[in-house]
Image: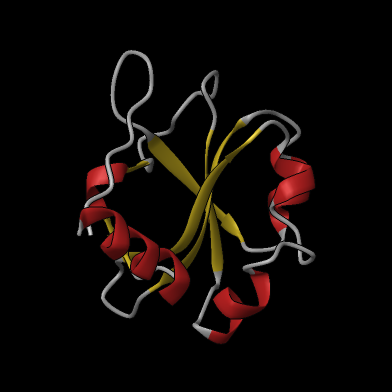
Amino acid sequence: MTMTLSAEGGNLEFASLYHRDGRFIRRDGVFAFSRRDADGGHTVLHMESAADISRAATSSHSRWDWAIANGMNELLVSTKDADNPKSAIPLSALRFSLHPEVTSKDSEIAA
């Protein structure tokens, strides 16, 4: 599956937060339910944009339980006006393991 995301002026960069800390990000941007792997890499389980991350990236999200069951232990966030620290994670460094419904819809579109 191919996923292309970019922001005005360049590629997205993400900050890594504890998976329940989305409630502190009261702004628009992109968030990802993610798993920090043993090798230090990040595997995205679900990604979407939101007008208010604090209201969208919560335990009531439709993909939350699936992401927890698949090892979610961090929340990646990218906001347009954020000062990205040296520890920012570029989009190109992420791996993706998305919900089966998402990948099957992409397969249908490609066919």
Residue with the most extreme bottom position: 69
**Rendering coords of residue 95 (x, y %):** 28, 62
Q: Is residue 50 visible?
A: yes
Vertical placement of residue 73 versus 33, above or below = below
Vertical placement of residue 39 versus 109, above or below = below
**Rendering coords of residue 74 (x, y %):** 54, 64
Q: What residue appears at the point 30 percent right and 69 percent down from the top-left corner?
A: 40
Pick the residue in front: 108 or 98.
108
Q: What residue appears at the point 42 percent right and 76 percent down from the top-left corner?
A: 100
Q: Is residue 53 left or right of residue 71?
A: right
Tag count in the figure?
0
Q: What residue appears at the point 63 percent right and 63 percent down from the top-left corner?
A: 19
Pick the residue in front: 17 or 26.
26
Q: How is the image coloured?
A: secondary structure
Q: Residue 84 lies in what quarter of the image? A: top left
**Rendering coords of residue 64 (x, y %):** 66, 70
Q: Residue 50 lies in what quarter of the image? A: top right
Task: Look at the image and tell me in which quarter the C terminus lies.
Answer: bottom left
**Rendering coords of residue 88 (x, y %):** 38, 40
Q: Residue 25 lies in what quarter of the image? A: top right
Vertical placement of residue 52 versus 59, above or below = above
Q: Is residue 53 left or right of residue 84?
A: right
Q: Is residue 12 left or right of residue 95?
A: right
Q: Is residue 44 visible?
A: no
Task: Look at the image and tell me in which quarter the N terminus lies.
Answer: bottom left
Q: What residue appears at the point 21 percent right and 55 percent down from the top-left corner?
A: 110
